[in-house]
Amino acid sequence: MADRPPCRCLLRQADPDLEKIVADYVSSLPEDARVPDAEYRRRLALCESCPRLADGMCMDCGCYVEARAAKAALKCPALPPRWERYAGE
């Protein structure tokens, strides 16, 4: 990956091998520690549209967004946070 500029993409486009490792980690989380699948997909869609995404990593905090988005206790580190639900949603 060093010979190309970072892409604004999730791990499935950036590094499929690392995507598998992160997916295995996410699936190993206790169910009560994970967000529901629909919320996970919503968070990832917001991450994909974020200018601070590079090669599956958040440039604000350095996490792999697929791992962070799966955890119920974590929030988006951007200011303002991109995952926040707004009134009327």
Image (spheres, rainbow, N blue to C red):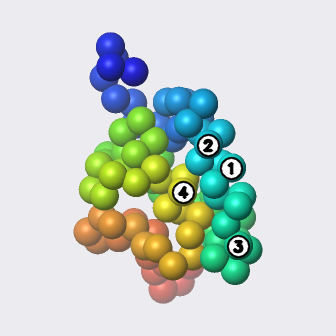
Q: Which residue in the protein does label 3 denote?
A: 30
Disc 3 secondary structure class: loop
**Mark positioned earlier in the residue sequence (4 or 2):** 2
Q: Residue at x 70, y 73 (%)?
A: 30
Looking at the rendering, which quadrant does residue 21 occupy? Answer: top right
Are circles 4 and 2 on residues that touch, CB within 8 Å? no
Specify the label residue 67 is tagged with.
4
**Mark positioned earlier in the residue sequence (3 or 4):** 3
* In the rendered image, the vertical position of residue 81 relative to residue 62, given as above or below: below
Q: Nearer the viewer, mark 3 or mark 4?
A: 3
- Left or right, 66 with respect to 64, comes to right
Residue type, label 4? Ala
Instruction: Return the residue found at the far bottom.
Output: 87
**Mark positioned earlier in the residue sequence (1 or 4):** 1
Q: Residue at x 59, y 47 (%)?
A: 22
Are circles 3 and 4 on residues that touch, CB within 8 Å? no
Whole-Å distance between the Cαs marked 4 and 2?
10 Å
Disc 2 secondary structure class: helix
Whether residue 21 is visible, yes or no, is: yes
Instruction: Return the residue found at the far top.
Output: 3
**Mark positioned earlier in the residue sequence (3 or 2):** 2
* Image x and y of residue 46, in percent: 48, 56
Residue type, label 2? Ile
